[in-house]
């Protein structure tokens, strides 16, 4: 691990309890009365298989500047595999993308369906309408940004959001 990775990971991990609380609310649903009465079941899981959820929390100050954009690391100076590569290669089911609040906790957030993201990237008619670009940081790390509003409605990329 690198020095910058360790610092950033430690910072982002402080938000994991908030991420778990927000995402968890979208993994459970209230059981129908019939199931509750006959099977002692009050809650149902959204999906019975493992759900792999990527989580990214931006530092304060970006939510108002980029309200409908999410970024994914697409190049690192070491040449190692990036989040974008992993997602394109089929890893991850959902992505939690949130903005840290200056007062603490998470402000604006999106829960994104990575299957819908991949579908938009591989379908020419969808891909041509996507609004995206690249941003290179001073350390050589590149992030690819995507405008959520440019994704098709079917399948919908947004599972849930705070707005």
Image: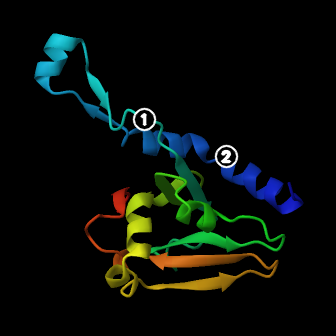
Q: Which mark is residue 49?
A: 1
Q: Quadrant of residue 34?
A: top left
Mark 2 highlights which residue?
14
- The percent coordinates of residue 61 (x first, y second) are 59, 72
Which mark is drawn over residue 58?
none
Residue 102 in sight: no
Residue at image coords 44%, 66%:
118
**Quadrant placement of the N terminus:** bottom right
Q: Is residue 59 left or right of residue 65?
A: right
Q: Secondary structure at mark 2?
A: loop
The x, y position of residue 103, in whole percent, is 59, 56
- Packing grade of label 2 (10 A; few <14, some 14-19, many >=20) is few
Q: Nearer the viewer, residue 57 or 76?
A: 76
Residue 24, by quadrant, is top left
Query: Which residue is painted at 38% across and 58% down in the image?
Result: 162
Q: Is residue 78 left or right of residue 31?
A: right
Q: Residue furthest right?
A: 3
At x 33% / y 38%, what residue is drawn?
46
The secondary element bearing badge 1 is classed as loop
Q: Is residue 132 visible?
A: yes
Q: Is residue 105 above or below residue 157?
A: above
Q: Position of residue 32 (x, y in %)?
A: 15, 27
Sequence-first disc among 2 and 1: 2
Q: Nearer the viewer, residue 75 or 26?
A: 75
* Front in this rendered view, residue 155 or 111: 155
Q: Is residue 131 left or right of residue 133?
A: left
**Pointer 1 local density, CA inside 10 Å: few below 14, some 14–19, many at least 20:** few
């Amino acid at each position: 691990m690198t020095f910058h990775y360790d610092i950033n990971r430690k910072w982002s991990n402080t938000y994991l309890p908030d991420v778990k609380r927000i995402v968890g609310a979208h993994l459970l649903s209230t059981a129908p009365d019939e199931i509750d009465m006959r099977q002692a079941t009050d809650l149902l899981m959204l999906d019975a298989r493992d759900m792999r959820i990527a989580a990214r929390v931006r530092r304060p100050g970006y939510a108002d500047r980029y309200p409908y954009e999410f970024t994914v690391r697409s190049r690192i100076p070491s040449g190692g595999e990036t989040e974008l590569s992993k997602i394109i290669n089929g890893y991850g089911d959902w992505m939690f993308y949130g903005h840290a609040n200056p007062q603490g906790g998470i402000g604006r957030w999106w829960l994104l369906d990575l299957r819908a993201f991949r579908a938009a990237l591989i379908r020419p008619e969808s891909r041509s309408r996507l609004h995206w670009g690249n941003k290179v940081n001073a350390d050589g790390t590149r992030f690819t940004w995507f405008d959520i509003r440019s994704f098709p409605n079917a399948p919908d990329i947004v599972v849930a959001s705070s707005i």
